Image (cartoon, rainbow, N blue to C red):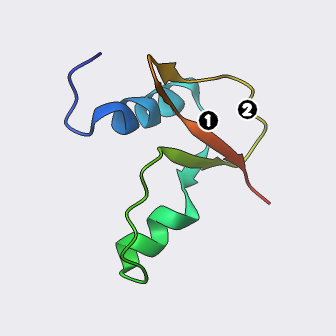
Amino acid sequence: MMASYGGFKAVSEQALERLGVAWQPSDELIRYNKGETTQVPVNATVVVKRRFNRKISLSNMRLKVEQSS
C-alpha cells in the first residue's frame, strides 16, 4: 500500500480527485466532525454527485460509494 498520512481513505479520496469525480464526505462523517454523535465511522464512505461505476479497493479494504440524492 502507498504510504499516506490518512491511510486507505485518504488515498482513495485522492484517486477520486485525480479521476475528476465530484464527491463529498458521507453524512456519518459530517455528523461526527460536528460533534453530533460519538460513533466513529469505520468504513471509508463517500457520496458522489454523478454516476460512478468503478471500484476502489486494496486487499480487504473497499471504498463504499453512495449516490447523491
**First along the sequence among labels 2 and 1:** 1
Residue 18 place in picture, x, y as percent: 49, 26
Q: Amino acid at mark 1?
A: Val
Whether residue 4 is situated above or below residue 46 in the rendered picture: above
Q: Residue at x 44, y 19 (%)?
A: 58
Residue at 45% across, 31% down: 12
Give the x, y percent position of residue 67. Answer: 74, 49
The residue that label 1 is drawn on is 21
Residue 69 found in image quarter? bottom right
Mark pair 2, 1: CA separation:
8 Å
Q: How many neighbours does mark 2 have within 10 angstroms: few (below 14), some (14-19), or many (20 or more)? A: few
The local crowd at label 1, few if under 14, some if 14 to 19, many if 20 or more residues have their Cα within 10 Å, is some
Label 2 belongs to which residue? 52
- Of the 4 image quadrants, the one containing the N terminus is top left
Picture coordinates of residue 65, whole percent (x, y): 64, 41
Seen in the picture, residue 69 relative to 2 is either above or below; the reply is below
Q: Are marks 2 and 1 in contact (CB under 8 Å)?
A: yes
- Front of the two marks 2 and 1: 2
Give, as a three-letter code, the residue at label 2.
Answer: Phe
Tell me the SS state at disc 2.
loop
Is 2 on the left or on the right of 33, as rendered? left
Residue 14 at x, y = what percent? 41, 32
Which element type, helix, strand or loop, lies under badge 1? loop
Residue at (37, 63) in percent of width and height: 40
Numbered tag placed on residue 45 in the rendering = none
Most foreground residue, 14 or 53: 53
